[in-house]
Image: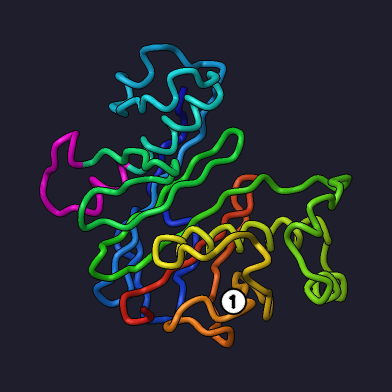
Amino acid sequence: MLDNISFDSPFEPPFDSSFTSSGTECISFNSRRLVFSSCDFSWQHYSQNSYKYYGVKQPCELANATAKRHSEFIAGRYCAIQAIKRLCYKPISVGQSQVTMQPDRSPLWPEGIIGSISHSSERAIAVVGSARDYVGLGIDCENLPTDTASPDITDLVLKPREQALLLARDQDYPFLLTLAFSAKESLFKALFPSVSALTNLHDFSICSISAKKLALSPSTTISDHWPSKTEFTIDYTEQSGHILTMATVTSDQA
């Protein structure tokens, strides 16, 4: 079911040049480590033994799920487990590396770990870091749009000012729309554990777009720590037919 398991960082070192590579499985910013794991998967190869084979605990909430949903869950959790094992300096048990499901269906990470999971129809990726370093992490994976992709989600993702900003750029609009959607998804994931008032993608507005970076600001003050003037930098890249975005919120930003 799973192919192409990897631990290569899909992103250029974010923030600034003080990022350094650490092997092929993680990047670090001073003492802040991020570990990635990704894989390709095919839901057609799912079987009842897949959970046991890949060491993923099946949640009761998915008892009646489709083979496609089971495969997405296994692929994402498998990547998360591999990343957690790489993050930890000492061996951990199977139970200590499991990422269970909360009542709202968001991931419940092991104590001391912050992470995020995403998947497209055939690719999954996870990123994890220490809760000492990060308040939130968000990652999102979207298929690159085709030339004929219809921008039917424009009004759900962008306000009129943002639409004008993207249309003014000399770039493919479906790509920019997908990028904006993915970036907002990543930031939503990163902030949601700390800011429960977030409701939709209009809670964030695009400030600027550059090569590999996109800046978002809250549309209104969402907490005492993050007023509307706050800018969050979202890293993005294209990889294997996908757009990947990542938001990081560090402990000194909270």
Q: Name the residue furthest front.
A: 197
Q: Mark 1 highlights which residue?
A: 218
The image position of residue 25, as x and y in percent, is 34, 53
> What residue lies at 37% left-to-right and 42% top-to-bottom?
102
- Identify the image quadrant of residue 178: bottom right
Q: Which quarter of the figure is the C terminus placed in?
A: bottom left
Residue 181 shown left or right of residue 140 in the figure: right
Residues in magenta, as a range: 81-96
From the viewer's side, name the closer residue of 101 and 242.
101
> What residue lies at 45% left-to-right and 32% top-to-bottom?
73
Q: Name the residue furthest top.
A: 48
> What residue lies at 30% left-to-right and 49% top-to-bottom?
109
From the viewer's side, name the closer residue of 188 and 10.
188
The image position of residue 128, as x and y in percent, is 34, 55
- Identify the image quadrant of residue 186: bottom right
The image position of residue 225, as x and y in percent, is 42, 82
From the viewer's side, name the closer residue of 4 and 73.
73
The image position of residue 61, as x and y in percent, is 42, 27
Q: Is residue 246 magenta?
A: no
Q: Amino acid at mark 1?
A: Pro
Residue 158, compared with residue 128, is above or below; it is: below
